[in-house]
Amino acid sequence: MATWTDAQMSSIDKMLNPKSVAVVGATPRMQYGGRFLNAMLKAQDRVNIYPVNPRYDEIMGIRSYPSVSDLPEAPDLVGIVVPYHQVLNVLQESHEKGAKSAIVISAGFSERDVDDRRDLQAEVGAFARESGIRICGPNCLGVANVQADIWPSASSRGSDGLSGPIGLVCQSGASAFGPFLTRAVEEGIGLSHIISTGNEADLDFCDFARYLLDQDSVSVIAGFVEGFKDARKLVEVAKVAADRGKPIVLIKIGRSDLGSRAARSHTAALTGSDALYDEIFAQYGITRVQDYDELLEVSQLLAHTGRPAQPGVAVVSHSGGISSLTADMCGQAGLDLPPLTDEARDGINDVLKGFGWAANPSDVTGFANSDSFPEIMRHMSEQPQIGTLVVASAGSDAQAEQVIAQRDNSERGLAFLWTGTRSATAGLSKLKEARIPIFYVPDKLALGLKTLLNYHEWVNVKSSEGFGQKEAITDTNIDFVTILRNDNPVTLSESKSKQLISGWGIPITREKLAENAAVAVRLAEEIGYPVALKVDSPDILHKTEAGVIRLGLGGAAEVSAAYDEIMSAAAQAAPGAQVNGALVQEMVSGGVEVIVGVSYDDQLGPVLLFGTGGVMVEVYNDVALRHCPITGSEAIGMINQVKGSRLLKGFRGAPPADVDALADVLARVSQMAVQLEGTLSELDVNPLMVLPEGQGVKAVDALIVFRE
């Protein structure tokens, strides 16, 4: 579980709110060192600025110092713009001087993909953590406290004073101070901070996001992430964000090796990296978007619009085509546009006097730019099922004032779909200044509105579930694992795999191991016909493909013959395999087949999988994934996510299945996964039979793979 110290947060605070800044490698030329110094000089009325370069006595009208050691005070922040091989020396000198934080603009570290450069970056990170002078970078463009107008950055751009409640954290400096900042300024989307984290030798996205969550002026975290050093920190950040009611919106790119790894179990083959991150984001309330505009526009809507009182959306425009397209996009996104009440329709028709049409969506023609438009907006929004009003127009100055007044005087949310030119107009400028959420194409508007609704629904559900408060996990069964692994196998046979999961209260089939055909017959008679016969071997993992299963055996002769057949098939399919004998197993019928599994991601740790069972899970990939552990109520949500779960509800006359027992098993397996982390590699229960309601579940087959 990730924790953040006061010292760590204090160092980030000094980086973003410095009272004194040293720029090591400052020059009079407008290269990185010169741009960093020039950006800081904008705040020289509030911040002591110290250029450091032994070749100059003065830079940009400011006295220059030969080294950090010669400074008149210990700086809160050191900006480092020197060749890569000098960075560690500068950090050591800065630490000796008493500096509190550092931004390493210098490149040439792990991004070069050379061993000695990676080693040097590791040294830089280790020094930062040991010394307490925490580092942003290397290979970044710095940071900006936009609200305080302090820009410790090597970027030549600025925001011209535009600020707002969105904290932006990007691993890519060129993206942070390039398209994101440019678009934010153009679209009137205010940022509180801009942080480029670069190679993240020390501080990473999660560290800065955690700091921003503590800032009252920040209401949304927006991020651009290529990969996480430790994705479990993201889970902890997401929990804090949920507790504070501050959404996280991310562009996540890149892949881990989980999806490409050769998998021995069905589970590991189904938990591809990108799908996994989608599921984890949904589990912890993180919104994933695809491009720059989506990130900024969705963040703006979340920052400036509260929870909709109702899920319904009302759309009003000067154009029938625009209103219809907007309604279509909303419908595709899963939003509802409830029909107008008789009172609202009659009220709008009284204004339109035969022009346009009064509906939802509504085409009000030229009345969108008339003194009557406020009355139309009031009728559209003040209906029992409406939570958000959308105005789609290229509004005049007067219309903008009317829309702003509607937003300010109504409990309903409001978003604007701008249909005109994006060049500066009085109306558009007024909307931006008033922080009206503005979209420019209908599909992104619909995405934003759906995201807003989904986020607040997620918050409500998680609040009722006690989000983050997982059941206690005990260590009762650790010795049991040691017993089962007394000969240190990597893979357990089916019988041993079932013994292991039964230790966590997961019901398994009645079964016994037979060493020859005669014993198999005797055991079948003890268990009761019909029975199943399966080869028990840790080396034959997929028994159906190997032809070593016989089902529905109804008598002694069938059992005896089946024993010989599957042993012969085993020898042919896997010569030299360890074969313990044959499992004589009760036949389980009248249930629904599902799969439950566990795999481990290098970044996220234990991942639980649930899906439709049998071989069809590989055909349709109808699965849900969750980070472990989960609660029983979260298990229900996981079950409902899978399309095949319809079979559990009594499909086509079949009795409803025992969903509560299934949810209990999912929670137990998730706890087992956490408890055995570091020991277990993969778990595959396929099929798990979900019996009719009140009869529970039974694991019919299981496979456990340990770490080698």
Image (tube, rainbow, N blue to C red):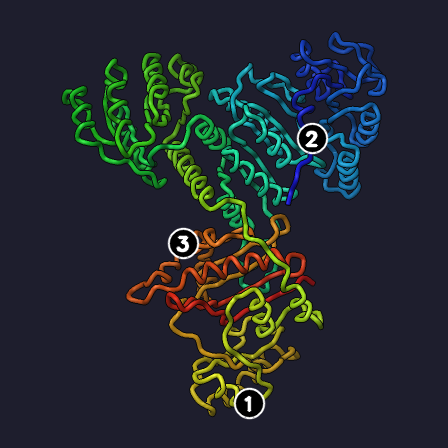
Element marked by disc 2: strand
Q: Quadrant of the C terminus?
A: bottom right
Tell me the tag on residue 136.
Answer: 2
Amino acid of disc 2:
Cys
First of labels 3, 1 by sequence position: 1
Q: Quadrant of the N terminus?
A: top right
The residue at which mark 3 appears reads as 640
Amino acid of disc 1:
Ala
Q: Mark 3–mark 2 contact, CB under 8 Å?
A: no
Location of residue 473 by image quarter: bottom right
Task: Provide residue 647's location: percent of width, then percent of height.
Answer: 36, 62
The relative height of residue 54 versus residue 525 in the rendered view (above or below) is: above
Whether residue 577 sits left or right of residue 134 in the image: it is left
| Residue in the image at 62% along x and 80% along y | 580
Task: Provide residue 256's location: percent of width, then percent of height.
Answer: 61, 49
Task: Provide residue 284's location: percent of width, then percent of height.
Answer: 51, 43
Q: Is residue 703 visible?
A: no
Amino acid of disc 3:
Asn
Element marked by disc 1: helix
Q: CA distance from mark 3 to mark 2?
A: 42 Å
Tell me the tag on residue 517.
Answer: 1
